[in-house]
Image (tube, coloured by chain):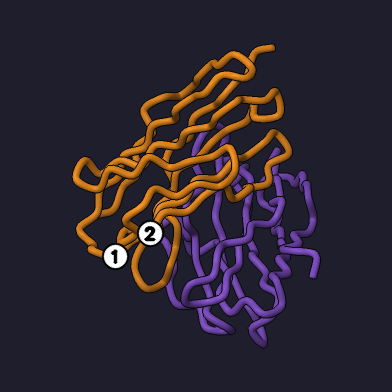
Chain colours: A orange, B purple
Amino acid sequence: AQKITQTQPGMFVQEKEAVTLDCTYDTSDQSYGLFWYKQPSSGEMIFLIYQGSYDEQNATEGRYSLNFQKARKSANLVISASQLGDSAMYFCAMREGWGGKLIFGQGTELSVKP
Amino acid sequence: DTGVSQDPRHKITKRGQNVTFRCDPISEHNRLYWYRQTLGQGPEFLTYFQNEAQLEKSRLLSDRFSAERPKGSFSTLEIQRTEQGDSAMYLCASRQDPSGGYTFGSGTRLTVV
């Protein structure tokens, strides 16, 4: 069965510094997609970045980059130049099968300190 | 298009009552997903539709839960005889198959007292 593991329940980072949020996954599929979402206290899931299993280059979206290491089955999110507004829950997710449902990890709560 | 809308945003109900939630997806999206998220956890898949067909249901979706998507447009999720364990955030997402991204609604927060 497919599984996403986020081992950091909470992380602290100083404003303007970079932070890495860990995500490992388990799948027997050759084709899959990995996502990161941000969920502020309001509850909405905000899409941040996507990495396809066949993408050779790591995905980047503004201050977000995904460190994709396929052999290690890891897809860590790197946030550069942290801002106070980055404080939120962050979820790693994997698209499963033809139906395309997402399997989510447990999340990491990021707190940015001024 | 204003994104995925969910109604109501909050619902407080007494144990044993029935509740119904509504999700309006992005109009051109043919796939619609329901998730449940309890406090401090990641969202858990409940069910999904392709157009009006319900193609997969999770084991989490007990016989007290039913979902519909008539005419492939909006969807409803009904919980009958609510229990305190049903208290959670219910999230809806839509996407355009096969390669579209997922757009989530703001969720419906259910509290069963």
- The image shows residue B113 at horizontal and vertical percentages of 70, 38
Amino acid at dot 2: Gly
Relative vertical location of residue B73 with respect to residue A27 in this rendering, above or below? below
Q: Secondary structure at mark 1?
A: loop
Q: What amino acid is labelled 1 in the image?
A: Ser
- Callout 2: SS: strand
Could you say where residue B18 lies in the image, as x and y percent from the top left?
Answer: 69, 59
Pointer 1 chain: A
Q: Earlier in the sequence, mark 2 or mark 1?
A: 1
Residue B12 x, y percent position in the rendering = 77, 44
Quarter of image, res B6 = bottom right
Quadrant containing the N terminus of chain B is bottom right
For the residue pair B18 and B57, the one nearer the viewer reads as B57
Rendered position, B1 above or below B34: below
According to the image, label 1 marks what residue?
Answer: A31
Residue A98 left/right relative to B21: left
Q: Where is A54 relative to A43, above or below?
A: below
Question: Is residue B88 positioned above or below A94 on the image?
Answer: above
Q: Residues within 10 Å of mark 1 (few under 14, many from 20)?
A: few
Residue drawn where x is 47% and y is 56% of the image: B45
User: In the image, A6: left or right of B18?
Assistant: left
Labelled pair 2, 1 in contact (Cβ < 8 Å): yes
Q: Nearer the viewer, residue A22 or A89?
A: A22
Question: Are dots 2 and 1 on a single chain?
Answer: yes
Task: Identify the residue under disc 2.
Answer: A52
Q: Which chain's residue wears label 2?
A: A
Distance in Å between CA atoms under marks 2 and 1: 8 Å
Left or right, A87 with reference to B50: right
Q: Nearer the viewer, mark 2 or mark 1?
A: 2
Which of the pair A25/B18 is nearer the observer?
A: A25
Expressed as whole percent of the image width and height from the top left, the position of residue B74 reads 71, 75
